[in-house]
Image: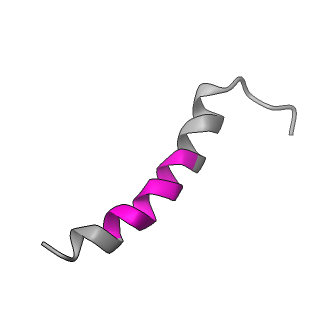
Amino acid sequence: MPSQSPISGILSPVRLRVIPPSLLPAHPS
């Protein structure tokens, strides 16, 4: 499925940005 290629590329950066803050302790915002 060629559609999986672009989709995974978009989810890749999105997951990386959502996972780090989730694993790290709550920042004093």
Q: Nearer the viewer, residue 26 or 11?
A: 11
Residue 19 within the segment the image draws in magenta: no
How far across and how far down the image is residue 21, in percent? Answer: 65, 37
Residue 11 within the segment the image draws in magenta: yes
In the image, is residue 21 above or below residue 3? above
For this orientation, the residue located farthest to the top is: 25
Q: Quadrant of the N terminus?
A: bottom left
Q: Nearer the viewer, residue 25 or 2?
A: 2
Q: Residue at x 51, y 56 (%)?
A: 14
**Main SS class of the magenta portion in the image:** helix
Q: Nearer the viewer, residue 11 or 22?
A: 11
Q: Nearer the viewer, residue 26 or 5?
A: 5
Q: Is residue 4 left or right of residue 19?
A: left
Q: Residue at x 44, y 66 (%)?
A: 10
In terms of image quadrants, where is residue 7? bottom left
Magenta stretch: give its range.
Answer: 7-16
Q: How many marks?
A: 0
For this orientation, the residue located farthest to the left is: 1
In terms of image quadrants, where is residue 5? bottom left
In the image, is residue 23 above or below residue 1? above
Q: Residue at x 52, y 57 (%)?
A: 13
Q: Quadrant of the C terminus?
A: top right
Q: Is residue 18 left or right of residue 11?
A: right
Colour scheme: one colour
For this orientation, the residue located farthest to the right is: 28
How far across and how far down the image is residue 19, in percent? Answer: 54, 39
In the image, is residue 18 above or below residue 7? above
Q: Is residue 12 left or right of residue 23?
A: left
How far across and how far down the image is residue 12, in percent? Answer: 44, 55
Q: Residue at x 34, y 62 (%)?
A: 8
